[in-house]
Image (cartoon, rainbow, N blue to C red):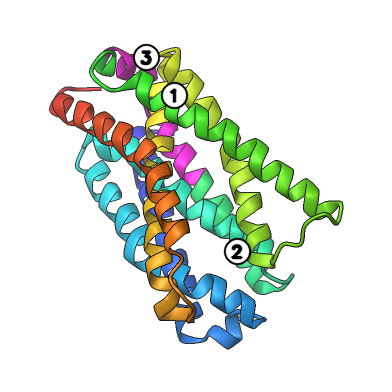
């Protein structure tokens, strides 16, 4: 596909994914009883709908705007923002009863993932590696991604196995996030190992995944703050503190990676 046509296609797909995610979140907030089949689903996902509007959509639209202007940071982080949308869509797909909403969120997950891959496909990864080599925190970022990828894969995999064997009981929302984590974890591990080995694909693939991980931790912190206000209940201070500490292991390398990218802006890739 010609470059201009590919860029127009990716832009249209990213805007469509953002519009669908926003429509789903607004529908959940305005028509909670119509969207969510049970009170537990409402309590679990209403705050997340607010997070989608406050965090998910602005990042997709912001990085897309920068990507269209030729920004390298937009090019590298836009796939991560789209993967954040895909992560949420997977969690909703698994948690929702089999209905039209199930099809809606499944389509959103596939669309977001496909668009993220489309952004990556337009990169010259070898030239990108030469440009970023030694100028971003490859080792730090790669170690964080690989570590969390392996940790989440075994943690969430064990939890789902316990649920399947009857040793643990999970709500529909917990099952959905566990499946989303289990799908995401191998991607983090792969991107982390590629970055650690300074492979060309690691700079393109790993950067987006590192941003996605940071966005997920930010979203989870905001979710804990919003949950008592939106769905009632008490503030989970202990959980918030744990997530904050874990998030720092991603926020710092992601910030260093972003700083390294900014230093190269203006160079051609």
Mark 1, secondary structure of its residue:
helix
| Observer-nearest of 124 and 230 | 230
Residue under label 3: 126
Disc 1 packing (10 Å; few <14; some 14–19; many ≥20): many
Residue 222, above or below 10: below
Labelled disc at residue 92: 2
Instruction: Look at the numbered discs 3 and 1 and tell me whether their residues touch, using CB distance below 8 Å.
Output: no
Q: Nearer the viewer, mark 3 or mark 1?
A: 1
Q: Please say whether residue 17 is visible from this viewpoint.
A: no
Residue at the (70%, 42%) spot, across then down: 157
Residue at the (67%, 69%) spot, across then down: 96
Mark 2, secondary structure of its residue:
helix
Mark 3, secondary structure of its residue:
helix
| Observer-nearest of 7 and 260 | 260
The picture places residue 151, in percent across and down from the top left corner, at 58, 35
Residue 197, above or below 123: above
Q: Quadrant of residue 109?
A: bottom right
Residue under label 1: 143
Query: What residue range appears in magenta?
Result: 114-130
Q: Nearer the viewer, mark 2 or mark 1?
A: 1
Instruction: Look at the numbered discs 2 and 3 and tell me whether their residues touch, using CB distance below 8 Å.
Output: no
Q: Nearer the viewer, mark 2 or mark 3?
A: 2
Labelled disc at residue 36: none
């Amino acid at each position: 596909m010609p470059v201009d046509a590919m860029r127009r296609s990716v832009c249209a797909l990213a805007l469509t994914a953002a519009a669908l995610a926003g429509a789903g979140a607004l529908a959940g907030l305005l028509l909670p009883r119509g969207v969510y089949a049970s009170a537990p689903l409402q309590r679990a996902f209403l705050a997340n709908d607010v997070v989608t509007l406050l965090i998910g959509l602005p990042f997709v639209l912001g990085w897309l705007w920068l990507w269209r202007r030729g920004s390298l940071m937009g090019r590298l982080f836009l796939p991560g923002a789209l993967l954040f949308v895909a992560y949420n869509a997977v969690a909703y797909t698994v948690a929702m009863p089999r209905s039209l909403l199930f099809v809606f969120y499944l389509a959103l997950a596939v669309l977001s993932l496909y668009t993220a891959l489309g952004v990556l496909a337009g990169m010259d990864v070898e030239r990108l590696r030469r440009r970023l080599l030694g100028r971003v925190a490859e080792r730090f970022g790669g170690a964080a991604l690989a570590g969390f990828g392996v940790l989440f894969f075994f943690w969430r995999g064990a939890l789902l196995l316990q649920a399947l064997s009857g040793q643990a009981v999970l709500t529909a929302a917990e099952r959905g996030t566990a499946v989303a984590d289990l799908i995401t974890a191998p991607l983090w591990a792969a991107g982390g190992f590629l970055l650690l080995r300074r492979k060309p694909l690691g700079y393109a693939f790993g950067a987006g995944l590192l941003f996605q991980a940071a966005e997920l931790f930010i979203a989870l912190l905001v979710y804990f703050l919003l949950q008592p206000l939106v769905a009632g209940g008490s503030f989970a201070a202990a959980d918030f503190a744990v997530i904050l500490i874990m998030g720092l292991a991603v926020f710092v390398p992601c910030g260093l990676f972003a700083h390294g990218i900014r230093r190269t802006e203006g160079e051609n890739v």
